[in-house]
Amino acid sequence: MQGLSSFAGTPFMKPLYSATVVIAFTLAFSACKEGSAPSGNSPEAAPDAISSVSLFNGKDLEGWKSVNFGGEGEVSVKDGQIFLEMGETMTAIGYDGTDPLPTTDYEISLEANKLLGNDFFCALTFPVRDSHATFVVGGWGGAVVGISSVDGFDASENETAQFMAFDADRWYRIRLRVTNDRLKAWIDDENVIDISIADRELSMRPGEIELCMPLGIASYQTRAALRSISLSKLKPSS
């Protein structure tokens, strides 16, 4: 297991909390297997969606590409899942479709599984207004959830930061909603992010994570699986 100090020189992670605190909130595990069979790739539309589309066909990487960080792990598709193998730093897929992405009034949902490793297994980079940001799930040693960045502060430093413990080989439902004045996110049925963004600056944390723009999903030194990726356009917010 990497010590928290090992993230100090990486392009995305830097230590903020003590190793003692992070370890207290992080689940240790020794052996993992590939995730269970997928529940299906049909998108679940948000209640107020005006349209919804699947972004993953369950067969190949059509509409996506492996992001070239240098030292990234292999990306593959098997049994209706996208596998991000453990790399020296990050491994990610980036949007490579032809359809333009919305920048407000939309929702992205997916399922993510941490198979092996002790850091984030889902860092979802997304467009917001005229910028981009990242919803980090399980960062900074495996326990931090939050948005990078809000008013120049990353997910470990702003008011969205919180600790959560994540089981190995368990599917988590990730959902992110972007409107003109609000940003919300859920993990399973828990609303973990709910902030006003009307007068806030959302931006990317400087570094290689910017290669995931405009839309991408990354893991850090962690083997992860993804499935059921969908995008819903919402009724225009006021």
Image (cartoon, rainbow, N blue to C red):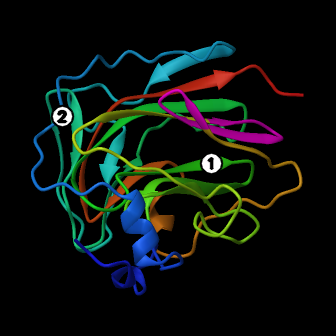
| Residue 192, horizontal then vertical, whole percent | 60, 41
Mark 2: which amino acid? Gly
Dot 1, crowdedness within 10 Å: few (<14), some or many (≥20)? Answer: many
- What are the residue bounds of the magenta stretch? 177-191
Instruction: Tell me the residue that label 2 is attached to.
Output: 35
| Residue 12, horizontal then vertical, whole percent | 46, 73
| Residue 95, horizontal then vertical, whole percent | 43, 45
Q: Is residue 154 left or right of residue 22?
A: right
Residue 187 is a magenta residue:
yes
Determine whether the residue tagged by mark 1 lies in a helix, strand or loop. strand
Q: How far apart, in angstroms, are the residues tagged by discs 2 and 1? A: 29 Å
| Residue 152, horizontal then vertical, whole percent | 71, 72
Instruction: Residue 127: give its label.
Output: 1
Instruction: Classify the position of the N terminus by image quarter.
Output: bottom left
Q: Is residue 223 above or below residue 140?
A: above
Q: Is residue 182 left or right of residue 57?
A: right
Residue at image coords 41%, 58%: 25
Q: Earlier in the sequence, mark 2 or mark 1?
A: 2
Mark 1: which amino acid? Pro
